[in-house]
Amino acid sequence: MLGDDAAPASAPCAGGSLLLRSSQWTSRRPGRSHLVPPAPEPARNPGHGPARLYVDDLDRALPLLTELTGSGPLRRFSYGELELAAIGDFLVVAGSPEALAPFRSVQATVAVDDLAEAERDLSAHGAEILSGPNDVPTGRNLTARHADSAVIEYVELREAPPSN
């Protein structure tokens, strides 16, 4: 399933993993399932995950973002009918309105070291697991609706994501 360009038949309602490792915006504490802010640096979005941008055409979106961020995409891959790219502090998700619909409800993506531990913590605090755990191109993920109604994707990243 990993690296497969087609979404699984049981595609998660809140989508697959849309998080990419970037030393500019994520740092994880070993043995913990919580995002740890990076060391102080001139990052544009310190201590937070990437800002998601939903677009209809990835190739049209990248030139402006390259100019704004001063760098090209760190990673680009396909997931089902979607094309994704991490560039600067942005995660760009491109596709048709229908393909993007299941992903739009996710408000943030958080990298965790232990997805099972994160799932236990979420359940203990009244979160509803909407999808997962799932195998996705970047590792494993689950999507949960917190008791306060926030929808968050949690991702346990593989050390070396495959490249397309």
Image (tube, rainbow, N blue to C red):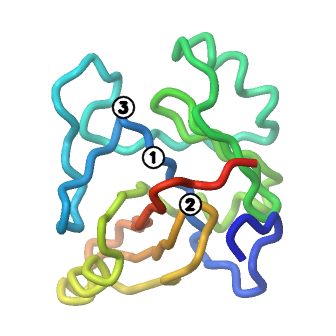
Q: Position of residue 55 (x, y in %)?
A: 72, 40
Amino acid beneath label 1: Arg
Give yes or no for contact between labels 1 and 3 (Cβ–Cβ under 8 Å). no
Q: Secondary structure at mark 2?
A: loop
Per the image, the residue denoted by label 1 is 21
Q: CA distance from mark 2 to mark 1?
A: 9 Å
Horizontal side of 12 relative to 151 (left or right) equals right
- Give the Cα distance between marks 2 and 3: 17 Å
Q: Which residue is mark 2?
A: 138
Classed neighbour count for the residue bearing mark 3: other residues with Cα under 10 Å, few (<14), some (14–19), many (≥20)? many
Q: Which kind of residue does numbered mark 3 sit on?
A: Gln
Residue with the mark numbered 3: 24
Q: For the residue labelled by badge 1, is the local secondary structure a helix, a strand or a loop?
A: loop
- Count the labels in the image: 3
Mark seen at residue 160: none
Q: Image quarter for residue 15? A: bottom right
Q: Quadrant of residue 58?
A: top right
Vertical relation: 36 (above or below) 120 = above
Specify which label sits upstream in the sequence, 2 or 1: 1
**Vertical position of residue 42 compared to residue 92: above or below:** above
